[in-house]
Image: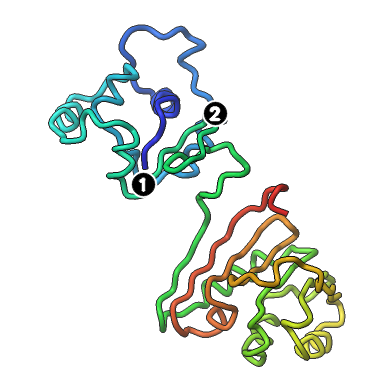
Amino acid sequence: MVISDRLFIEYHKFIGSKFEGELLDDESKYDKRVVKSMLRYFKNNWYTNYLQYVRNNVVMPSSLKNQLLHSKSRKKSLEELAAESAYKIILNDEGKTTFPYVDIFSDDESIKNCLTATFKNGRDRSKAREHIKRLCSKASDIFIYDKYIKKQSPVILNLLKFILPIRSINIHYVPSHFDTMINDLESFCDKWTFVDESIMKSHSHHDRYLVIDNKIEVILTSGFDHLARDIDDFTYVVREIKQNDL
């Protein structure tokens, strides 16, 4: 992906690149907050060109200079570079959020760098089940959302018995999703307290969710039954929840 000129300079300060001319001591120190937020999105390398190096006075190693100087992209704008890049976006810290810009500091930014895992049809999912079980292991509150969950109740029951911690926790649910499954779960662990969330506004959501202590959200793109069994394609996303997401 592409980064703005401001991020480009901070990144090269961070990795110790040389700059044309002299920098004052306080200017040579990189902004740790910027670099930390930028590196959350890092994928192997940044997509750049000769013009961005020259424009920001960053010294290029001779091998890289020769490569960039003879590239067809050497004089293209950031927007043109982004169109050529794998992820098609430009990271920035200036509040730009209109595509292709992604603001690394905005809580309202839709494009995030989340942890994901994908399993093709027939691929063993035990690692995913163990991962989600561990995410739930220290939770006090877990919200389970899947409006199709009761259609696979025997399979889902065994899955929930595996991933939910056997101790005192609050399990939030929408009754119409679970039907009679709640009776089976209550019988399995009397330490679980079930909280009716019928008033939730998200009843029409297609994706399935586990929300853990309002801090971590696990998004399941194709249902809990596809986590329980190695059928069809299955992907899950793990992301931190910000306060304005609640």
Q: Nearer the viewer, mark 1 or mark 2?
A: 1
Residue type marked 1 = Lys
- Identify the residue shown where x is 74% and y is 73%: 165
Quarter of the view holding residue 206: bottom right
Quarter of the view holding residue 246: bottom right
How many numbered marks appear? 2
Q: Is residue 225 left or right of residue 203?
A: left
Whole-percent x and y of residue 114?
Answer: 52, 54
Residue located beneath label 1 in the image? 88
Whole-percent x and y of residue 128?
Answer: 54, 72
Residue nearest the viewer, comparing 137 with 242: 242
Question: Counting residues from the N terminus, which is met first, the one under dot 1 or under dot 2?
Answer: 2
**SS label for mark 1:** loop
Q: Is residue 89 left or right of residue 210?
A: left
Looking at the figure, which quarter contains the N terminus?
top left
Residue located beneath label 2 in the image? 32
Q: Residues within 10 Å of mark 2 (few under 14, many from 20)?
A: few
- Identify the residue shown where x is 78% and y is 91%: 180
